């Protein structure tokens, strides 16, 4: 490459990194996850409750032959479970070893934003992993972007489980 040709790697690094978000609504709030973390979606799925589950865990459901743990996004933020029907209106199945899904009242759209448009959530006072990676604003709405790698720990770390001793 001659010195007169521009370096392609520098040109790419100068451009903003674009991220696709899959949005959904629950409890009057708008949430999103990065689109590459979504395995699929489903409508009207029955959830089987689990006894003694933490507030964020709604139960188990089946999507396309996979058993997933359904989480309440409102309870992930507040610790208080939203009142959900046994048949969830919408479900967002997530990629990953934890086999998680998020309950939703309705699906939004896929939004493309610049990575610089995400305000990083800075709540360092929390003793547990933060379920929200950041907040973005789009179309006049505040969108809470969930951190899929932290969802399992955020849902289950809240309640310490006791072991039976024999």
Image: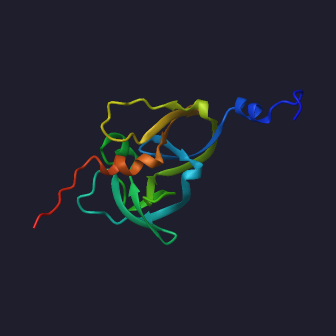
Quarter placement of the C terminus:
bottom left
- Name the residue: 45% across, 53% down: 102
* Residue 28 place in picture, x, y as percent: 44, 41
Residue sitting farthest toward the top: 4
Between residues 40 and 121, which one lies in front from this camera angle? Answer: 121
Drawn side of residue 57 relative to residue 160, left or right? right
Quarter placement of the N terminus:
top right
* Residue 51 place in picture, x, y as percent: 24, 62
Drawn side of residue 139 relative to residue 103, left or right? right
Q: In the image, is residue 64 above or below residue 143? A: below
* Residue 142 place in picture, x, y as percent: 51, 33
Drawn side of residue 46 relative to residue 136, left or right? left
Q: How many marks?
A: 0
Q: In the image, is residue 90 above or below residue 20? A: below
Residue sitting farthest toward the front: 2
- Name the residue: 49% across, 46% down: 25
Drawn side of residue 105 relative to residue 75, left or right? right
Between residues 163 and 79, which one lies in front from this camera angle? Answer: 163
């Amino acid at each position: 490459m001659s010195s007169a040709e521009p370096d392609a790697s520098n040109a790419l690094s100068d451009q903003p990194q674009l991220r696709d978000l899959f949005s959904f609504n629950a409890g009057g709030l708008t949430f999103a996850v990065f689109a590459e973390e979504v395995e699929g979606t489903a409508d009207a799925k029955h959830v089987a409750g689990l006894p003694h589950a933490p507030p964020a865990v709604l139960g188990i459901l089946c999507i396309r032959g996979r058993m997933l743990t359904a989480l309440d996004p409102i309870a992930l933020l507040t610790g208080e479970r939203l009142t959900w029907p046994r048949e969830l209106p919408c479900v967002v199945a997530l990629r990953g070893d934890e086999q998680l899904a998020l309950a939703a009242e309705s699906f939004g759209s896929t939004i493309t934003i610049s990575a610089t448009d995400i305000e990083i959530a800075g709540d360092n006072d929390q003793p547990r992993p933060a379920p929200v990676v950041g907040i973005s604003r789009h179309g006049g709405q505040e969108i809470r972007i969930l951190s899929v790698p932290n969802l399992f720990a955020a849902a289950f770390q809240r309640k310490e489980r006791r072991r039976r001793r024999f």
